Image (cartoon, grey):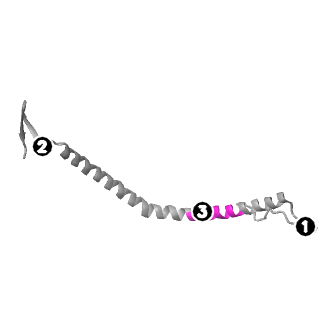
């Protein structure tokens, strides 16, 4: 993917590297490290995706199902809590259900 040749500037025996050349070499090293890290991610990404599909997705489905069940229970509970203790029997008269 990338050439193996390093682009660093070598110091001459009679002339040290300038600050700009040292900075260039430092940036080249950073790029090389970032490329190696990217290669590692690209190598492990399929393994991560496989583990995610086998472990996390089924758990997410279970969580979604539990949330739906909880929502149904809450709806029923709220309906029951909202029911009045008195029921209207006829116009203007109330009778206790207890």
Q: Are marks 1 and 2 in contact (CB under 8 Å)?
A: no
Q: Is residue 90 above or below residue 31?
A: above
Q: Which residues are magenta?
A: 32-44
Q: In terms of secondary structure, where does tag 1 sit?
A: loop
Q: Residue 52: x percent and y percent?
A: 47, 61
What is the number of callouts on the image? 3
Residue placed at 86% from the left, 63% from the top?
17
Q: Which mark is residue 25?
A: none
Task: Using residue 37 as the reference point, say whether residue 71 is left or right of it.
Answer: left
| Residue furthest to the bottom | 13
First-in-chain label (1 vs 2): 1
Instruction: Write the residue at 83% across / 57% down.
Output: 20
Cα separation, mark 2 vs mark 3, equals 63 Å
The mark lying in front, picked from 1 and 2, is: 2
Q: Is residue 37 magenta?
A: yes
Q: Which of the 4 quarters of the picture holds residue 7?
A: bottom right
Residue with the mark numbered 2: 85
Q: Which residue is mark 1?
A: 12
Q: Residues within 10 Å of mark 3 (few under 14, many from 20)?
A: few
Q: Nearer the viewer, mark 2 or mark 3?
A: 2
Instruction: Locate the N terminus and report the quarter of the image it occupies.
Output: bottom right
How busy is the neighbourhood of tag 2: few (under 14 within 10 Å), some, or many (20 plus)? few
User: How far apart are the alpha carbons under marks 1 and 3?
Assistant: 37 Å
Q: Residue 31: x, y in percent?
A: 72, 60
Mark 3 element type: helix
Q: Which mark is residue 41?
A: 3
Residue that appears at 22% across and 49% down: 77
């Amino acid at each position: 993917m990338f050439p193996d040749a390093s682009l660093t500037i070598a110091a001459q025996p009679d002339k040290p590297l300038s600050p700009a050349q040292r900075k260039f070499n430092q940036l080249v090293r950073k790029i090389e490290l970032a490329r190696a890290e990217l290669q590692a991610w690209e190598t492990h990404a399929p393994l991560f995706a496989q583990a995610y599909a086998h472990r996390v997705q089924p758990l997410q489905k279970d969580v979604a199902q539990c949330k739906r069940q909880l929502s149904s229970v809450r709806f029923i509970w709220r309906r029951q809590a909202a029911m009045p203790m008195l029921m209207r029997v006829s116009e203007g008269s109330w009778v206790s259900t207890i």
